[in-house]
Amino acid sequence: MNQFRLFCTIVVTFVSCFGLSRADDWNQWRGPNRNGVAPTSPQFIEKLPATGLKPVWLSADEIPSARAGGWASPIVADGCVYLFTHGKKKVGKESEGRAKYPYLAPEKRTGMTDEEYEEYEQNRRDEQEARSKAYKFFEVTYCLDATTGKTKWTAENVSVYTRFPHSGSPIVIDGRLLVLTAGRTAKCLNAKDGKELWTTKLPGEFRDQFWQSSFAVVDGVACVMCGSLYGLDVKSGEVLWSGDERETKGDHTSPVVWTHADKNYFVANGGGDTICVEPRSGKEIWRAESEAQKSTPVVVGDLLITYGSSRKKGLRCYKMSATSVEHMWTFQGAADSGSSPVVVGNAVYVQGERRLACVDIESGKAQWTATLDISNPRYTSLVAADNKIIYAFDGVLCFAADTSDYKQLMNAKIDGEGTMAEEEDFRKILGIAELEKTAEGQKQAERLWRSQFGKSGPLPCTTPAIVDGRVYFRLKDRVACYDFRKQ
């Protein structure tokens, strides 16, 4: 083992042992160290039973998602599952007919100049805002028992319209739940009963913007991205500092904590760069031209991993110090609009477009790549436990954290009752092969398949939580817990 690999191994051990929460918690988005890795884990199953894996529990109450409730991810702390939603209720007459200015995906903007697209977007915002008058908006924070899934409490508040539902994932630390809600509003609740401790309106203009950032907390300071970077006092909610609106500009990325030489720092993507700031003052220490934007950086010891939205921007690795940052390598074999990679051992595992890649952390060279049989996967981050990596996008993919080759362990669907099984096993359970023997049976099989899986499965763009071998998914209509422990 050379010195670099020895350093990485020591670093992973250090981060696992000295994280910001108990090792058995997943108290914030992407886990206790915001790197997507469960610090401790029992052995995971490597194959699903042919009859499917039943959930330990499904939340009794339906929890709206996506356009009706947002895309926030569940977290687990002190025996509870927490989830934030942003929804709406119809109170008036909705505008008739299709929108004149629907959302245009990048591939549909061909031929439009930047000025034409900017004008189109302005018209779209005006139209959406007019249509929103038919609704009242609200936000609900859920607390579920992590063992049973039963609701322990909910906290509901009146909210405001945003172009997309606000989807900030909460963080729980020292009995306090912090979440960035709609309308540039930061909230702190008592994690035991949901009672409000403080609410702070962050300075700055607001019309219909949505920010999906999750707080990071260290040294009594809560840091979040809300148009620009902010630092708040955890106990009072007082705004301690705010970053420059251009130099720290950002929306969906979340800051992370970096500890170096017994000092803590926040590291965040902002203004097209990745910056390091002091927690109490917000003073900038250094800046890297990473071109990372919506993804969240990954810190492993003194190594920084960033991920861009194009292959030119790529996956990048930097070596950090208390005064500067040094670029180590760039891998340009993958890109994604907003997902974050995961580091396990001496490799970075990354998803981009329909590709998975395993990249050596020392050299930046691809160890292997694989193609996903998924339509347009994006915004969904990888998580890991027991040297296995989970990717939850519509279905559940699990593969080995192995640098020698791509080794798929499961590629499962989840039906309306919460059963998780391989597609081939579901085909047997539902008798699809028999139905497909006739033309009419093929139509029946297609309807049956859609009825089972059309409105079920993991909610895309969310990240599972992993605690003691149990994996908590936000499904399209509720939260589910599965026991992945090898029996």
Image (tube, rainbow, N blue to C red):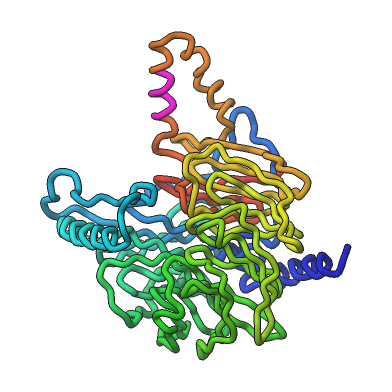
Q: Residue at x 22, y 54 (%)?
A: 89
Looking at the image, is 94 positioned above or below residue 315?
Answer: above
- The number of numbered badges drawn on the structure is 0
Is residue 237 or residue 255 the one in the foreground? 255
Looking at the image, is 172 positioned above or below residue 117?
Answer: below
User: Seen in the image, is 301 located left or right of residue 51?
Assistant: right
Looking at the image, is 249 positioned above or below residue 424?
Answer: below
User: Seen in the image, is 441 located left or right of residue 157?
Assistant: right
Rendered location of residue 248, percent (x, y)? 46, 78
Q: Residue at x 49, y 51 (%)?
A: 378
Residue 386 visible in the picture: no
Is residue 405 highlighted in magenta? no
Q: For the C terminus, which image quadrant?
A: top right
Is residue 481 or residue 461 the one in the foreground? 461
Rendered location of residue 157, percent (x, y)? 29, 67
Residue 231 visible in the picture: yes
Q: Which residues are magenta?
A: 444-450
Q: Quadrant of residue 159?
A: bottom left
Please identify the residue farthest to the top as the structure is shown: 438
Q: Residue at x 50, y 87 (%)?
A: 282
Please identify the residue farthest to the right as the structure is shown: 1
Rendered location of residue 50, percent (x, y)? 63, 28
Q: Main secondary structure of the magenta part?
A: helix
Q: Quadrant of residue 396?
A: top right
Rendered location of residue 42, percent (x, y)? 72, 52
Q: For the N terminus, which image quadrant?
A: bottom right
